[in-house]
């Protein structure tokens, strides 16, 4: 600044003016709500928007660990995706910086949950004869992102317990069951408490077989006895005396034959004398 009088004398002064940016970036849009729920294994997409005339860059932190730093353009959308978070609570923080080092921060609490039930197969029902050879086994397959436990009931009574890993089989041999009807109920529970149930019906048939019934009248055998005819010997005074016997199978026939023979012998002897 110069000041002059009428004689040309003057005085001056200089004032230095520094123009600085004292305004931090303004975050105009961000994920709704302070908390975001994420299903385990799914992808989380977060979007922010900030403006500043001297924009510079941004950094995203997950649980206080920087995972990405990138250029930030004024008023542009900033997207961030993540999918490998473990179960539990996680802090996702974004920091916007302008050219002069001023910053603005926004934080989101991400709650990762497992709300998916295990995948459990459904074996077909079984029916077999008691004592039949060969193993009769029920096999269930179970798949989940986490390990878990199981309870196996037979007709409502706990029969077996155990644990399973993320991809496993649960089996039971029912070959030794006696005749009757059974139901086997399997309940699997994963690490997060999600459960799945399946029921298999088992029918064991009797090994004994009853004779088939018939509506036809029973057959009977009728034996007809044909009386035996025995011819009485014909006696004459001639030299030739014949004996006709139809059958000698009965005792009486033999008796008459013997008597006839004796009489014949006696008559011949008498004739000769």
Image: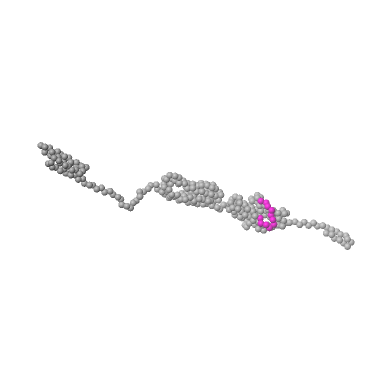
For the C terminus, the quadrant is top left
Which residue is painted at 43% across and 49% down in the image?
127
Which residue in the rendered view is the most extreme toward the front? 239
**Residue 111, can we see it?**
no
Q: Nearer the viewer, residue 55 or 7?
A: 55
Q: Is residue 81 magenta?
A: no
Q: Determine whether, in the image, residue 204 is placed left or right of residue 37.
A: left
Which residue is painted at 25% across and 47% down in the image?
223
**Residue 62, can we see it?**
yes
Q: Determine whether, in the image, residue 72 is placed left or right of residue 14.
A: left
Which residue in the rendered view is the most extreme toward the left? 273
Query: Vertically, is 7 above or below 41?
Result: below
Estimate the x, y position of residue 222 in percent, counting from the top left: 26, 49
Q: Is residue 77 magenta?
A: yes
Estimate the x, y position of residue 78 in percent, counting from the top left: 66, 55
Q: Which residues are magenta?
A: 68-78
Estimate the x, y position of residue 135 in percent, counting from the top left: 45, 45
Q: Determine whether, in the image, residue 172 is placed left or right of residue 83.
A: left
For the N terminus, the quadrant is bottom right
Q: How is the image coloured?
A: one colour
Q: Nearer the viewer, residue 79 or 64?
A: 79
Which residue in the rendered view is the most extreme toward the bottom? 6
**Quarter location, residue 243:** top left
Which residue is painted at 69% across and 56% down in the image?
73
Which residue in the rendered view is the most extreme toward the right? 7
Estimate the x, y position of residue 115 in percent, counting from the top left: 56, 53
Q: Determine whether, in the image, residue 121 is placed left or right of residue 223.
A: right
Q: Total label count? A: 0
């Amino acid at each position: 600044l110069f000041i002059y009088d009428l004689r040309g004398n003057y005085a001056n002064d200089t004032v230095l003016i520094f123009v600085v940016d004292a305004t931090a970036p303004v975050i105009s849009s961000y994920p709704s709500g302070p908390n975001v729920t994420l299903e385990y294994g799914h992808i989380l997409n977060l979007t922010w928007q900030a403006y500043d005339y001297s924009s510079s860059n941004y950094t995203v932190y997950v649980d206080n660990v920087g995972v990405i730093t990138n250029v930030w353009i004024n008023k542009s959308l900033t997207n961030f995706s993540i999918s490998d978070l473990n179960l539990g609570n996680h802090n996702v923080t974004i920091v916007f910086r302008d050219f002069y080092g001023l910053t603005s921060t926004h934080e989101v609490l991400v709650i990762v949950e497992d709300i998916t039930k295990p995948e459990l197969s459904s074996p077909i029902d079984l029916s077999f004869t008691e004592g039949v050879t060969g193993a009769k086994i029920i096999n269930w397959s179970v798949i989940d992102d986490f390990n878990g436990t199981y309870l196996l009931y037979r007709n409502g009574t706990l029969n077996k317990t155990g644990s399973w890993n993320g991809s496993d089989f649960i089996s039971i041999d029912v070959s030794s069951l006696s005749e009757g009807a059974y139901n086997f109920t399997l309940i699997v529970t994963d690490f997060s408490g999600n459960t799945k149930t399946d029921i298999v019906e088992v029918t064991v048939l009797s090994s004994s077989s009853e004779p088939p019934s018939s509506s036809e009248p029973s057959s009977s055998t009728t034996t007809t006895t044909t009386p035996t005819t025995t011819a009485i010997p014909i006696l004459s005074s001639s030299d030739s005396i014949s004996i006709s016997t139809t059958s000698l199978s009965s005792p009486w026939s033999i008796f008459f034959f013997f008597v006839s023979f004796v009489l014949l012998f006696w008559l011949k002897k008498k004739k000769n004398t």
